Amino acid sequence: MTDILLTFFIISLIYLSIANRLMAYVGNLVFQGLLICGIAILSLEHLTILNLSMILLETLVVKAILMPFFIRRVIISNKITRETEPSVPYYVSLIMTTVFIIGSYLIATSIESTTLNKSYFVAALSGLLSGLYLIATRRKVITHVICYVVIENGAFVLSLGIGSEMPVLVNLGVLLDVLVSVFLLGIFINKVGDVTGDGDIQHLNMLNDYPQTETEK
Amino acid sequence: MSETAIAAYGILTIAIAAIQAFNRSEAMCRVLSWLFVGSQVAVTIAAYQSMGEKPFGYFTIDSLGLLLMTCVTVVSAASFSHDRAYVRTENGRDDSAVRSQFYAALTVLTAALTYSSISADMAVTWIFIEITTLSASALIFYRRTSRAIEATWKYVFACSVSLVIVYIGVLFASISMGKSATEGLSYETLTEMANELDTFWLKLSFIFVLVGYTAKLSLVPMFTAGIDAKDEAPTPAAAVLSSIVMNAGFVGFYRYYAVIAHTEVYEWARMVVLATGLLSIFVAAVYLIRVNNIKRLFAYSSVEHIGVVMLGMAAGGIGVYAGILHLVIHTFVKSAVFLHVSQLYRVFNSKLLSNMGGYIERCGVGGTFVIIAMLCVTAMPPSGLFMTELMIFKSLIDVRWWVVLGVSMVILCTIVWAICRDMLALTFLREKRERETSVTKEKMPVVEMLWQFALIAMSIWLGLATPETVSKLIWGAAELLK
């Protein structure tokens, strides 16, 4: 069962590489949040109330509801155009994501480890790599935030793939990280939007090492 | 004793930061800041008295922690004593809300740095360093201009991604531990299990932890975000970012490196650290030759110095001792230099080196300071950094890394030339400047002058005649690798 959910997670990455609407990205985040929730509940050996509530909070509430909702609100309130505007053609992204998935699979098969579940490793590594790739090839700031969440999802799947459970402290830390980063980044998108008019990363190029004139202090 | 002190300090910090964030009175914010500095001094003294204790199991009061905690206390006190002048002179608008946030963020940042320096668990270090990112971003955003937004955005994003990378490193570390990761990821447990750790995952984990923390450490490959941040942050914040925040990154790296030193991948890890150090020095030199912004110049100089520290860490032996001392001295030198930039800005109304010149005529004390600071930053005698660099070179000779020694010396000479060229022109040269304004004399505020000269004097004293207490602490910290 977990393998099916992990496969869906990988498929969602492929979809992400060719989606051209921002709202499709947001929908994808909800989908990934639900998948991760399912994977987490299925892979827990001892289901206690504390464990279950932590997982529900972390995946369902935060990853599947709060963050997509917040990102959607930022998109609407900032009147960000709905296209993702990649700097490379979609088919290149599709090929790259496929390469990442196959590469992750090949790496996973070459590793000998008793503590690591390999299908989790494949999904996690593909998530991390395609997240980083999408950040590098998409021009909108909001897309970068969404891809950051995809990387976080990959890291979360990796933490589930480790046989032993991670200490609660680490989970809490991750939760803090994701929540605060996304909200903080969301707030800054408002500010970036104020300055640039749209959330295009190309406007953020004022800081460099060899300024000829000083426009402001 | 230490548990009570640490808990009380935490509660007080939260209370002070909360009041500062919502209070609009400057006087109130200042009083609270000094109350916080008082509690910072108190917790440092309490820590000295409870050396060796492990409060709450998540912290450890050891040599390295004490040393870096003291640095945090000194530099934060210096920064807090510069903010009044800063807030009044450089922020023309009456933005009481912005000012309150500034004070609150600086308070939270200092506290997070204090906790991270004594953390005994990978996860705890990680969490407090995360808090430093968040509070530092509020400081970088201080001016609310488009450049500040850009710097903050880049800093938050790069640090968030790098902390995810560290998190993955922590996960790999727990894979290398096998089933016992549920006991927590304390450095002590990891060291005890050193021989049982899986080498493949350990190597992978070390790479991820090192790369992740380079964002804070200002090392290759993630140094760029820190440079923009130091450029745009107000000077008291830039002083903190280029000294004790880098030390926090060092704690994260060094405590894990100490675990690695007990495993069979140590030799491999040394090579990785050496490569990072050498590359950082090289990259710093490339930028320093052409940079035209004084804050970025000093920021790249930090990249160089941390690169030198890494050379010492890789060489081992006396290099580790010299590396840690180098880090401590660099903390004082760089905070003093960054604090002085606010005075330079008052005189020239610009950060660009091409707009500055004849400084010694306009501000005699400032000009003298820049010359002394130039000697200290470039590690020329009587700078304390001269002594430590000499020791680091000695350690490179000890391990017979002749090529590394030769290459790093050539690059360092280039850096000395580049910095001296800019600093001497700034101080003495009045012709050929782009913006020639009338020569008006600008006095330096006494409090600022005292702090900056005190920090520089401390750095020279630490290098030339290292006090026995400090020496013992550094040896204690270096012992972690054995």
Image (spheres, rainbow, N blue to C red):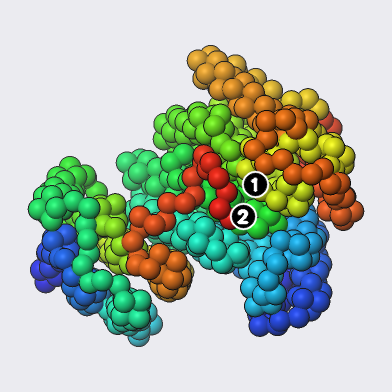
Q: Secondary structure at mark 1?
A: loop
Which residue is painted at 70% across and 67% down in the image?
Answer: B92
Q: Determine the residue positioned at 67% across, 27% down.
A: B421
Above or below, B407 relative to A34: above
Position of residue A156 in the picture relative to residue B267 (left or right): left
Residue identifier under label 1: B351
Q: Is residue B409 left or right of residue B160?
A: right
Q: CA distance from mark 2 to mark 1?
A: 7 Å
Whole-percent x, y for residue B126 in the image: 50, 59
Q: Note whether residue A48 is visible.
A: no
Residue denoted by label 2: A217
Q: Nearer the viewer, residue B392 or A199?
A: A199
Location of residue A162 in the rendering, given as x and y in whole percent from the top left corner: 29, 60
For this rendering, which residue is in front, B450 or B245? B450
C-beta proximity under 8 Å, tags 2 and 1: yes
Q: Amino acid at mark 1?
A: Lys
Instruction: Describe the element under mark 2 as helix, strand or loop.
Output: loop
Tell me the quadrant of the picture where the N terminus of chain B can be found. Answer: bottom right
Q: Is residue B398 left or right of residue B209?
A: right
Name the residue located 46 percent from the left edge and 39 percent from the top edge. B220
Quarter of the figure with residue B300: top right
